[in-house]
Amino acid sequence: MTFFRRVGEKLYVQSRLLFQASIVTVQSACILHLITDRIGFIQECKGESMLPTLAPQGDWIYYSRLPYYPSTSFLCAPFQRGDLVIATHPYLPDRTVGKRIIAMEGDTVEVDPGNLRAVSGKDGGKGWVRVPKGHVWLQGDNLSNSTDSRDYGPVPMALILARVEGRIWPTWTDFKNNLRWHRDYEEDT
């Protein structure tokens, strides 16, 4: 009788440990999901549209999903011109694009200032566009090889998923926005 009792106790202890380990695993998975869904995530950058800022492949980037609303908190800041962001593609919702914010709502932007495209955008690459309320103008740094707002127009801010905070690999690079808008210069003088 003692043999079966010892075997039963061992099975009970092992099953209890297995149950506790599975609870910890589920909790860890939930915490990891919460972090990647609400705080930030790391992902490899692919594509040539952000050359020379980002390599076409091999750069691992940290994206922050923290809320970006006007706030006094150091963690929260509104999107600004010059920020690198990742957004859902306006016409292909299963794809994301990594671009730089060139203009905010109310700004006027020249669609193709360098005449780099034979046909670009809805107006053939000519003219100016006023960015409507709740939208931004996104462009890649590699203007000659980027599908961006010059092709699909202003992008709703609701499609912006995260801000690029820095390159993790191969070398750490902090992408603090040091772009100054001409209106900032006007206010300083």
Image (cartoon, rainbow, N blue to C red):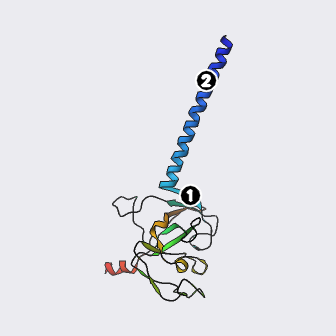
Q: Secondary structure at mark 2?
A: helix
Counting the numbered discs, the total is: 2
* Residue indicated by mark 1: 42
Q: Which quarter of the figure has residue 26? A: top right
Q: Which quarter of the figure has residue 131? A: bottom left
Query: Looking at the picture, how far across and down is residue 146, in whole percent?
Result: 59, 77
Query: Looking at the picture, how far across and down is residue 166, in whole percent?
Result: 52, 63
- Determine crowd level at label 2: few under 14, some 14-19, many 20+ residues with C-alpha closer than 10 A: few
Query: Looking at the picture, how far across and down is residue 133, in whole percent?
Result: 39, 74
Depth check: give the residue in front, 90 or 70. 90
Q: Is residue 6 above or below residue 124?
A: above
- Determine crowd level at label 1: few under 14, some 14-19, many 20+ residues with C-alpha closer than 10 A: some
Observer-side mark, 1 or 2, equals 2
Asked if residue 19 lies left or right of residue 178, the reply is right
Q: Quadrant of the C terminus?
A: bottom left
C-alpha span from label 1 to label 2 = 41 Å
Q: Which quarter of the figure has residue 120? A: bottom right
Q: Quadrant of the N terminus?
A: top right
Q: Secondary structure at mark 1?
A: strand
Q: Is residue 3 visible?
A: yes
Amino acid type indicated by mark 2: Tyr
Dot placed on the residue nearer the N-terminal end, 1 or 2: 2
* Residue indicated by mark 2: 12
Q: Is residue 165 above or below residue 15?
A: below
Q: Are marks 1 and 2 in contact (CB under 8 Å)?
A: no
Asked if residue 30 lies left or right of residue 59, the reply is left
Q: Is residue 68 above or below residue 50?
A: above
